[in-house]
Amino acid sequence: MIDVTASVALLYAVTVRRLRRTGKLIGTNDLWIGCTAKAAGLPIATRNAEHFRRIPDLVVLDYTRA
C-alpha cells in the first residue's frame, strides 16, 4: 500500500488539469492510481495501457501483449 502524500496530490492536480484541458481526462480512480505510481517511481501493469499512457512519463506495462 502506498500513501497519498502532498506530492502525489500535487501531481494529481497538475495532471488532471492538463488532461481536462486537452480533452483526454481518464477516470478519477485510475488517475489517482497512476499519479501515485508515478510519484513512487513504479510502473503500472494494465490491460488498459492506452488509458494510462495519457499520464505523462508514467511507465505503463501492457500485460496483454506480453
Image (tube, rainbow, N blue to C red):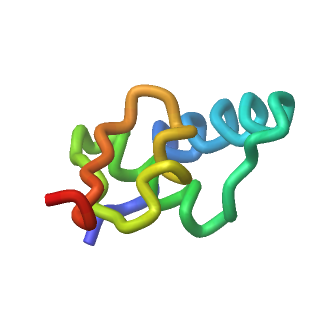
Which residue is at the far left?
A: 66
Closer to the camera in the image, 7 or 43: 43
Is residue 47 positioned above or below 13 on the image?
below
Is residue 10 positioned above or below 36 on the image?
above
Which of the image's four quarters has the C terminus? Answer: bottom left
**Looking at the image, can residue 5 be seen?**
no
Closer to the camera in the image, 66 or 15: 66
Q: Residue at x 36, y 62 (%)?
A: 3
Which residue is at the far front?
A: 65
Q: Residue at x 68, y 63 (%)?
A: 27
> Which image quadrant is residue 17 in?
top right
Q: Is residue 64 left or right of residue 52?
A: left
Instruction: Give how far across and how far down residue 21 sits, in percent.
Output: 85, 30
Instruction: Give how far across and how far down residue 65 sits, in percent.
Output: 23, 58
**Looking at the image, can residue 27 be seen?**
yes
Instruction: Give how far across and how far down residue 63 sits, in percent.
Output: 23, 63
Q: Is residue 59 left or right of residue 14?
A: left
Instruction: Give how far across and how far down residue 41 sits, in percent.
Output: 23, 38
Which of the image's four quarters has the N terminus? Answer: bottom left
Q: Is residue 20 left or right of residue 65?
A: right
